């Protein structure tokens, strides 16, 4: 992928699972654990992991689409702050 920040989610049995990943060149600016917790907080969950890979879950799946859409702005803000 080169430089990338990814967020993936799935719903199974009324529970969302989220995985986030950050390539090594962005780890100093964007932490996967912070990103996954930002998403999870919007769906009634929490998570954690390493700076490059993190997982979370939550049960408020009705909010998952908007939570995933908020990733773009969150990443843009982190990149702006780093400049």
Image (tube, rainbow, N blue to C red):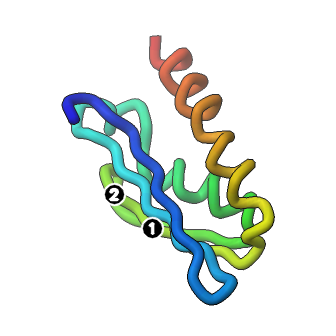
Which corner quadrant holds the N terminus?
top left
Q: Residue furthest bottom?
A: 13
Q: Is residue 61 above or below residue 6?
A: below
Q: Which residue is mark 2?
A: 53
Q: Residue drawn at (69%, 60%), measured in percent from left and top?
A: 64
Q: Quadrant of residue 80?
A: top right
Q: Which mark is residue 67?
A: none
Q: Could you tell me residue 47's position as x and y percent?
A: 53, 69
Q: Secondary structure at mark 1?
A: strand
Q: Which residue is mark 1?
A: 55
Q: Are marks 2 and 1 in contact (CB under 8 Å)?
A: yes
Q: Residue drawn at (53%, 69%), measured in percent from left and top?
A: 10
Q: Residue drawn at (46%, 10%), measured in percent from left and top?
A: 83
Crowding at label 1, few (<14), some or many (≥20) Cα neighbours within 10 Å?
A: many
Q: Secondary structure at mark 2?
A: strand
Crowding at label 2, few (<14), some or many (≥20) Cα neighbours within 10 Å?
A: many
């Amino acid at each position: 992928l080169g430089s990338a920040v990814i967020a993936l989610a799935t719903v199974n049995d009324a529970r969302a699972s989220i995985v986030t990943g950050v390539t090594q060149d962005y780890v100093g600016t964007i932490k996967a654990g912070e990103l996954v917790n930002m998403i999870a907080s919007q769906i009634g969950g929490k998570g954690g992991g390493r700076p490059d890979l993190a997982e979370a879950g939550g049960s408020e799946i009705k909010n998952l689409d908007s939570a995933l859409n908020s990733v773009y702005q969150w990443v843009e803000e982190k990149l702006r702050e780093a400049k």
